[in-house]
């Protein structure tokens, strides 16, 4: 029992299995994938508050296991989501894909439980590297390019984080991962904030998400939708609660993401933009510095992890069956994929804050807190929510399932059972959390006392969603997906990259020309002269020495052959003469 009462890091199981996974053979190895997630759940509900696994390094303490109310709530969430994500990816037979996801999930636990910036930095890097492989394993030219752009921008986040950590240590004298003063931000605080904002897909640093997530593997996109941005939200909550700049950034994100989700054609890119929008709601709640706003943000982190993963599962299943990812090429699938349709509707309505679903019990708190702070802020978030419902609750299901007549004779790939089970399980979680919100509120680091099921909130939500649905009937043709895509900040990244390459290519080409001429005039001539000298020495020196040695050996061989006549008496006589000659030389030689 003492062993069970001691602290065990949830990440260790994921890392160990990832390291030994390549050595397993047969078919049963995939069942081992459930061991680390289930063990993480066991550990999460047995964790006690405190600091564990403290290591001393260059005079500083590295804390690998800081357990408080904030980190514990995220550990519980991540442990639950690892089981769901692993179940959804169970059919994948590629060990490298599972190893990357195991490292990714383990690193996310490492970030959440980090008690100092160095530990956070190490696991932050591991998350970035392992998550990139979930994009590259799609093995398409677009996924390769998107993965490198993803890596480059998140590496910028790592550089900013490292710079902020080092500058902070020089001023503060410690690496403790703790809250900053929102009313007196230092220069290193802004650098750390910028690093967290990049990973949190804050506009204008969001384009890595909308560019890379649609190109990931079907299970990989589900993993990515849960852990990267959620870890960034955790870091922002840990350090920058009450920072008013987050409110402004949050509103911009909420409106920006919802607007772009109404224009794109790729079904997973729609969800990627809505991730940006939902992140804006979270940042707004964190920045308002009110108990209700922070509680709503933390509740939305939980709810969003479930319904966002559900939507990525549903769209991934749709891609798996129909082999199509563009909304304009889908349609007429309602009767053929009823499970996918039902799960899509549950996830979409949860994101749209439909009552009795988990999104409602979180977003309603943020909207109420925003209204108390500023009616303009509340109206801006309500407008973003209207765009969210139009994009994911109406436009996506309509054009994916109902906009066309069912096609006859077209065969679809069968859906693996584990994918269906994962979707249904996640749908049930969204419904249960929405009906019994206290189950959700009890896991939050902030005490939530507000009641989401007041009459005016429920009636207002239904009236709001009903009015948008009525308007959609008349404007749906104008929202039809097309082949064109509105320019986004990822184009700016590409132009900047091309500009940097163009600027650097000229001096590099100039240096290459100088080196080429130098090589031709100096190095190549010197090598040619050395080769000529070596050839002459080989012919005049080495060859003559070898030839002389060969002649001498041949001559001795001939003399020896003549001496060996086959007569024993003559051979003994020669041996006696040779021995006498050697004795005479040794006796009469002047040694002194």
Image (spheres, rainbow, N blue to C red):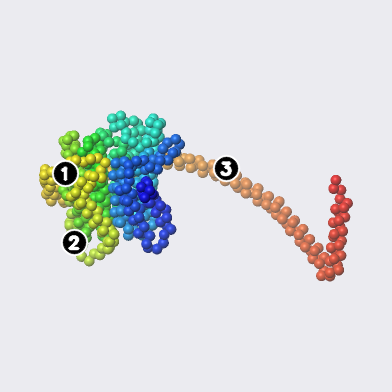
SS at circle 2? loop
Q: Is residue 236 above or below residue 29?
A: above
SS at circle 1? loop
Closest to the camera, between mark 1 and mark 3, is 1
Residue tagged by mark 2? 335
State the mark number for residue 452.
1
Q: Considering the image in quadrants, where does the C terminus appear?
A: top right
Q: How far across and down, in percent of the image, does residue 235 sit? A: 32, 40
Q: How far across and down, in percent of the image, does residue 376 sit? A: 17, 36
Q: How far across and down, in percent of the image, does residue 344 sit? A: 21, 54
Left or right: 540 with respect to 351?
right
Q: Nearer the viewer, residue 421 or 392?
A: 421
SS at circle 3? helix
State the mark number for residue 213.
none
Closest to the camera, between mark 2 and mark 3, is 2
Is the residue under label 3 in contact with that under label 1 (CB below 8 Å)?
no
Q: Nearer the viewer, residue 81 or 160?
A: 81
Whichever of labels 2 and 3 marks the residue nearer the N terminus, that label is: 2
Q: Is residue 244 above or below residue 274?
A: above
Is the residue under label 3 in contact with that under label 2 (CB below 8 Å)?
no
> Does the image show residue 459?
yes
Closest to the camera, between mark 1 and mark 2, is 1
Q: Residues within 10 Å of mark 2 (few under 14, many from 20)?
A: few
Q: CA distance from mark 1 to mark 3?
A: 81 Å
Residue tagged by mark 3? 522
Q: Nearer the viewer, residue 420 or 144?
A: 420
**Residue placed at 26% from the left, 59% from the top?**
420
Q: CA distance from mark 2 to mark 3?
A: 76 Å
> Does the image show residue 127?
no
């Amino acid at each position: 029992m003492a062993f069970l009462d001691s602290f065990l890091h949830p990440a260790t199981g994921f890392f160990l299995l990832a390291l030994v996974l390549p050595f397993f053979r047969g078919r049963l190895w995939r069942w081992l994938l459930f061991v680390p997630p289930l063990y993480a759940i066991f550990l999460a509900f047995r964790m006690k508050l405190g600091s564990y696994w403290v290591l001393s390094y260059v005079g500083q303490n590295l804390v690998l296991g800081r357990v408080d109310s904030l980190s514990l709530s995220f550990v519980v969430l991540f442990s639950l989501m690892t089981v769901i994500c692993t179940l959804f990816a169970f059919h994948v037979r590629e060990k490298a894909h599972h190893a990357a996801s195991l490292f990714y999930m383990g690193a996310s636990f490492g970030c959440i439980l980090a008690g100092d910036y160095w530990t956070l930095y190490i696991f932050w890097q591991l998350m970035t590297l392992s998550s990139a492989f979930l994009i590259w394993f799609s093995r398409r030219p677009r996924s390769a390019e998107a993965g490198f752009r993803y890596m480059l921008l998140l590496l910028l986040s790592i550089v900013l984080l490292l710079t902020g950590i080092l500058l902070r240590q020089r001023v503060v004298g410690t690496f403790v991962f703790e809250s900053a003063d929102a009313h007196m931000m230092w220069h290193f605080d802004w650098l750390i904030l910028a690093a967290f904002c990049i990973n949190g897909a804050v506009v204008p640093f969001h384009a890595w998400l909308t560019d890379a997530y649609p190109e990931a593997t079907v299970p990989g996109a589900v993993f990515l939708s849960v852990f990267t941005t959620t870890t960034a939200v955790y870091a922002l909550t840990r350090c920058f609660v009450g920072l008013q700049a987050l409110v402004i950034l949050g509103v911009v994100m909420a409106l920006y993401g919802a607007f772009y989700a109404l224009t794109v054609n790729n079904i997973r890119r729609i969800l990627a933009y809505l991730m940006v929008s939902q992140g804006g709601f979270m940042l707004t709640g964190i920045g308002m510095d009110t108990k209700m706003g922070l509680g709503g943000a933390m509740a939305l982190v939980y709810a969003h992890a479930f319904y966002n993963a559900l939507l990525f599962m549903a769209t991934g299943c749709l891609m798996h069956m129909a082999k199509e990812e563009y909304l304009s090429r889908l349609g007429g699938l309602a009767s053929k994929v009823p499970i996918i349709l039902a799960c899509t509707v549950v996830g979409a309505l949860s994101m749209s804050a439909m009552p009795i679903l988990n999104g409602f019990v979180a977003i309603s708190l943020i909207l109420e807190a925003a209204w108390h702070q500023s009616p303009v802020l509340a109206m801006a978030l309500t407008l973003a929510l209207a765009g969210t419902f139009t994009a994911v609750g109406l436009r996506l299901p309509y054009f994916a399932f109902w906009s066309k007549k069912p096609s006859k004779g077209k065969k679809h790939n069968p859906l693996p059972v584990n994918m269906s089970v994962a979707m249904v399980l996640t749908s049930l979680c969204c419904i249960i959390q929405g009906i019994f919100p206290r189950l959700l509120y009890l896991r939050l680091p902030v005490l939530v006392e507000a009641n989401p099921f007041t009459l005016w909130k429920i009636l207002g939500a239904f009236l709001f969603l009903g009015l948008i649905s009525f308007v959609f009937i008349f404007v749906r043709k104008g929202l039809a997906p097309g082949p064109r895509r509105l320019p986004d900040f990822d184009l700016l990244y590409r132009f900047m990259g091309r500009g940097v390459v163009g600027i650097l290519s000229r001096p590099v080409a100039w240096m290459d020309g100088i080196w080429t001429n130098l090589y031709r005039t100096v190095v190549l001539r010197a090598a040619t002269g050395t080769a000529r000298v070596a050839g002459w020495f080989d012919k005049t020196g080495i060859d003559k020495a070898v030839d002389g040695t060969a002649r001498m050996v041949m001559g001795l061989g001939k003399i020896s052959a003549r001496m060996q006549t086959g007569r024993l008496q003559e051979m003994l006589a020669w041996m006696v003469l040779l021995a006498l000659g050697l004795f005479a030389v040794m006796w009469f030689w002047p040694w002194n």
